[in-house]
Image (cartoon, rainbow, N blue to C red):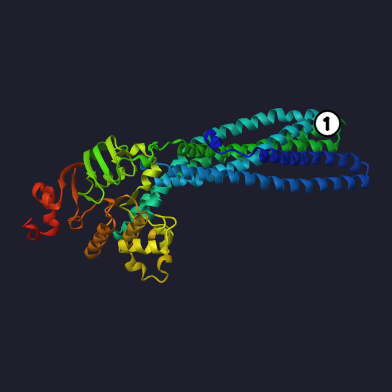
Amino acid sequence: MRTIFSKIRLNGYQIIGLSILVLISAIGEMLLPSLLAQMINKGVASASEKIIFIVTVVMAGITVMSCIVNFLSVKLATRISTEFSAKLRTEVFTKIQSYSSAELDRFGIASLVARSTSDIMNVQNFLTMLLRIGILAPMMAVSGLVFSAATGGKVSSVLTVAIPVLLIGLSIIVVLASKYSIKLRQKLDQINGIFLESLEGVRVIRAFNKQKKESFRFGKANEEYTQTTVNAGRITSFLMPVINVIFGVTTAAVLGLGAGYVEIGAMEVGSLVANSQYISMVLMAVMMFAMVIMMFPTTYACSGRIAEVLETQSSIKDGDFQTEHRPLRSTVEFRHVTFAYPGADEPILKDISFESHPGEITAIIGGTGRGKSSILKLIPRLYDPLFGSVLVDGVDVKKYKVEELRAMIGYVPQKNVLFSGDIASNLNFGKESGTEQEWKRAANIACADEFIEKKEKRYHECITQGGMNLSGGQRQRMAIARAIMKSPEIYVFDDSFSALDMKTDKTLRRNLKKNLKNATVIMVAQRISSILDADRILVIDDGRIIGQGTHGELMKTCALYREMAEIQLGKENIKDE
């Protein structure tokens, strides 16, 4: 929790104001039993209606004042905790945005969502309770003990036994329950992960009729979470019985001792009533504080998970190189690059070297899972290589500020993600101040105008979350248009034409070559027909470049490439190659 409070500071003036309000409320509540004692001893005993009326009015006034003060204190405590959680949520979100893909892979999306929502909400609820009851309970306990000693004398000695017994019992319950808190959060992460995976893959699950299997998998995780919750609940279920037993025994002891003192004239009836109420208040204050303590193990576990996010530093660090001092423009070079994903047993890329220059199209082709997409991820520093260097414009990418490096790159990922809004807002993701003329140009180059112009609202047509109201090919063309809006020096296409038909693919490639003459284009492709006119083709197998050249050169020098060409294009179409 120290990490959280070092990041988000509470407003000192608000805390002081809240403490004053709580103190006033506590004093008001402590005055009521004393006034009740005065009413009984001086008013009821002497049958004085005047005294009874005056004391009643005073007690009513104090009660109304306490209600108003309580309302203000609750409002202020809620405001403090809500503002705190809002700032904390922003801090966590900002931190996650700075993560590289390695950190995102390490935590997992489901866990990060849980840490950013339910974990922060748990901390907020605990803070609200702490600010209200955590401040009020000690004040009531101390003042209750003082007033009880003043009005009850020896009767108050019952508390010297009751309070330690209550604290010991509550401590045992808290310690036993706390061991389940972290385990519960871990089980919740597991459930969130399965649920998120099932939602994302719902079409696949239905297509393969695996609903029962997925339900069983979710049911098993849910059962484990339920069992852990039940075990924790069994322990916490002893809380109220322990409190009620101690509360009842203490009250009986107070009334028993007090009755004896009243009988021998050592104590007035009003004082006994007031003293019993003070003792009840003390025990109630201890019980309320115990309720706050019961929340602490879960909150501590949640705060630890949040702190882990805040303390984790991105493996991608900014350099200090000034982009205006670049010796080259629009060039990409890999020098003996070896790369492995975090936790992998062996590198996915091994000794990769090539260069790509302005006006050139470099295509990367190979079998599935051979490392093609991994090459592209190293250019905008989504990951960093283990060995070797990736250079942009003659400078190692690690020397650039990440923001400035990525500003030079138009990246179209393998999974095309669109955001809720409209077509225009998605295109402006590439350029915030984009105009309608620029939208039309980008859409025309990406062949997206074909379906956009058919929409009723055209560029202001609604896009649902993830672009699910568009087809796969439409999402791909939108993603390409978004990158073109950015007008970068380097275009990186990660298998961005796979959902396009042959005609659209050919038109789009022609448009790119015509309009991106001064830019460097690096693309991953599955279809050889998409890269026939590439200036350089890299053939990747088992993480290594086994062939490099134009289509004609590779047909003669690379057996794997020729085999792929024969399968895709047909032997009869390449017999003269």
Task: Tell me residue 44's x, y (percent).
Answer: 89, 43
Task: Tell me residue 521's x, y (percent).
Answer: 27, 51
Q: How many labels does the image show?
A: 1
| Vertical order, 273 against 575 (above or below) | above
- Which picture quadrant has residue 209? bottom left
**Is residue 152 toward the left or the right of residue 76 in the image?**
right
Residue 209 vs residue 337, the one in the foreground: 337
Q: Residue at x 81, y 45 (%)?
A: 62
Residue 325 vs residue 70, the one in the foreground: 325
Q: Which residue is drawn at 11% across and 52% down?
A: 552
**Is residue 171 toward the left or the right of residue 231 in the image?**
right
- Which picture quadrant has residue 435? bottom left
Task: Tell me residue 275's x, y (percent).
Answer: 79, 35
**Is residue 11 toward the left or the right of residue 25 in the image?**
left
Give the residue number, with chain letter if any, for mark 1: 261
Describe the element under mark 1 as helix, strand or loop.
Answer: helix
| Vertical order, 563 against 43 (above or below) | below
Q: How many other residues sit within 10 Å of disc 1, few (<14), some (14-19) or many (≥20)? A: some
Residue 275 vs residue 112, the one in the foreground: 112
Position of the N terminus, as image quadrant, is top right
Task: Tell me residue 415's x, y (percent).
Answer: 32, 53
**Is residue 37 toward the left or the right of residue 333 in the image?**
right
Which amino acid, by three-letter code, is at mark 1?
A: Tyr
Residue 244 makes an appearance in the image: no
Position of the C terminus, as image quadrant, is bottom left
Residue 158 vs residue 252, the one in the foreground: 158
Residue 537 makes an appearance in the image: yes
